[in-house]
């Protein structure tokens, strides 16, 4: 039985136990899963390759490994964590539902296309608005904070997954001069191939997004 069939069976069981797991993106490099759990909902034993967890809500859960050992885990909305390959069951210990996005890094994936090199790295040219909560040999994670009407300088990205933590409305000017209108809602996700762009927050509130850059 394939790993995908096993995972799909676990997703059905999770739905019956007050939880839901849905695949939002699946390509040669990543599989992105949205995880939701009702208050005290349970997710049966399942496994992930190395992954990045992005919390869309507060999380208070109990994780139980194949050996039966458990640990209680707490995260705040907006937290990001890199996790090595793991197998566990989960139980929401809270009286509130939780929601998270799990970006799985596919084992043996081909190298993602490199970014164009004519524009600078965003952390170098605008470190105030591009924080780096995770940086290892697999990914670099950026927390991009766009205050109202901020226009970032032209910069480059390798291929990445973006998770929008807040409502966001930006325009993106691409290297070839094209303009892209980019309205987003909290919790939306997208995959972007390597490219370079300039971003302007045309909204009236601060917007925050998480970018998981692939190495």
Image (cartoon, grey):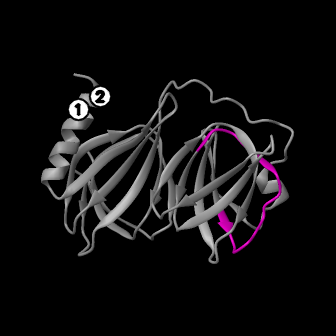
C-alpha gap between disc 2 and disc 1: 5 Å
Q: Position of residue 56 (x, y in %)?
A: 43, 64
> Looking at the image, which is closer to me, 172 or 11?
172
Q: Split into 4 quadrants, where in the image is the N terminus?
A: top left
Residue at image x 63%, y 74%? Answer: 206
Answer yes or no: do the residues labelled 2 and 1 have beta carbons within 8 Å?
yes
Q: Position of residue 165 (x, y in %)?
A: 51, 64
Q: Is residue 89 visible?
A: no
Whether residue 74 sits left or right of residue 158 in the image: it is left
124 relative to 177, above or below: below
Disc 2 crowd rating (10 Å Cα; few below 14, some 14-19, many 20+) is few
Residue at image x 72%, y 40%? Answer: 195
Which residue has dot 1 on it? 6
Q: Position of residue 109 (x, y in %)?
A: 53, 26
The magenta stretch spans which residues? Answer: 144-160
Q: How many marks?
A: 2
Which residue has dot 2 on it? 3
Q: Position of residue 89 (x, y in %)?
A: 25, 50
Residue at image x 69%, y 75%? Answer: 148
């Amino acid at each position: 039985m394939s790993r995908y069939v096993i995972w799909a069976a676990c997703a059905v069981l999770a739905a019956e136990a007050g939880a839901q797991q849905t695949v939002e993106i699946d390509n040669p490099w990543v599989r992105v899963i949205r995880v939701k759990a009702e208050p005290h909902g349970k997710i049966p034993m399942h496994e992930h390759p190395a992954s990045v967890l992005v919390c869309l809500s507060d999380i208070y859960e109990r994780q139980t490994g194949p050996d039966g050992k458990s640990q209680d885990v707490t995260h705040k909305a907006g937290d990001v964590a890199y996790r090595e390959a793991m197998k566990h069951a989960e139980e929401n210990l809270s009286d509130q539902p939780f929601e998270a996005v799990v970006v799985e890094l596919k084992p043996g994936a081909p190298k993602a296309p490199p970014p164009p090199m004519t524009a600078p790295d965003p952390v170098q040219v605008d470190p105030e608005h591009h924080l780096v909560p995770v940086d290892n040999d697999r990914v670099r994670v950026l927390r991009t904070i766009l205050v109202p009407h901020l226009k970032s300088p032209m910069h480059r990205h390798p291929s990445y997954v973006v998770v929008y933590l807040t409502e966001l409305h930006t325009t993106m000017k691409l290297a070839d001069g094209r303009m892209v209108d980019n309205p987003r809602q909290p919790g939306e996700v997208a995959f972007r191939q390597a490219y370079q762009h300039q971003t302007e927050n045309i909204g009236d509130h601060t917007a925050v997004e998480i970018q998981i850059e692939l190495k």
